[in-house]
Amino acid sequence: TVLEAAERHQELIDELIETVAAYNKDVDRDLLTRAFTFAARAHEGQQRRSGEDFINHPWGGEDLRGLRLDEQTIAAALLHDVVEDTETDVKEVRDEFGDEIAQLVEGVTKLTRIQ
C-alpha cells in the first residue's frame, strides 16, 4: 500500500525534503512525498544491477542534489522511470500529479530515448 511504501522509504523521503528545504524554505513536502511514494510503489520489487532498490536511482545521484531544482522538476525526475520501466502510463501520472508534471515526465522520457 501507499502507506507501507512511504514508511519503508521514510529516510530517503526525509533526505529529499531536507535537501530541497536547504534552498527552498517553502518546499512542497506533500508533492515530494507523494511523488517518491508513487515511484517507490510502482518500482516495488525492481532492483538495479547492483542489487540496490530501483527507487534509489532517480534521487540517489549527486547530479540532482546539487542542481537546486524546483519540486515539480524533482517530481518528474522521480517519476520518469515509472513510465519507462513499469506498467504505469503517463495518464496515471497526469491523473495523480497534473498536466505540468506529466509534461515534464514525457519530456524526460523522450530525452532518454535519444541516442
Image: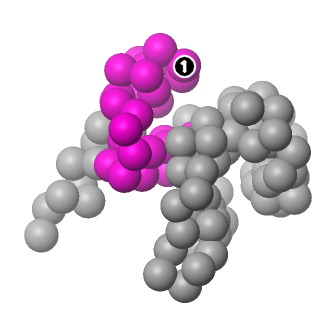
Looking at the image, the residue that sits furthest to the left is: 115
Give coordinates of residue 49: x percent, y percent: 47, 81
Q: Is residue 110 left or right of residue 96?
A: left
Give coordinates of residue 40: x percent, y percent: 63, 48
Give coordinates of residue 45: x percent, y percent: 58, 57
Q: Quadrant of the N terminus?
A: top right
Q: Image point 35% across, 29% down: which residue?
A: 90
Residue 87 higher or lower than 81, as above or below: above
Dominant secondary-structure state across the stretch colored magenta: helix
- Residue 80 seen in the figure: no
Residue 52 higher or lower than 80, as above or below: below
Q: Is residue 52 left or right of residue 20?
A: left
Near mark 1 (Cα within 10 A), the count class, few <14, some 14-19 or many ≥20, is some
Q: Closest to the observer: 70 or 50?
A: 50
Q: Assess whether residue 85 is covered by the magenta stretch.
A: yes
Residue 112 higher or lower than 21, as above or below: below
Residue that numbered label 1 is attached to: 96
Give coordinates of residue 24: x percent, y percent: 78, 44
Q: Secondary structure at mark 1?
A: helix
Type of residue at label 1?
Glu
Total number of numbered labels? 1
Q: Which residues are magenta?
A: 74-103
Q: Closest to the observer: 72 or 58?
A: 58
Q: Quadrant of the C terminus?
A: bottom left
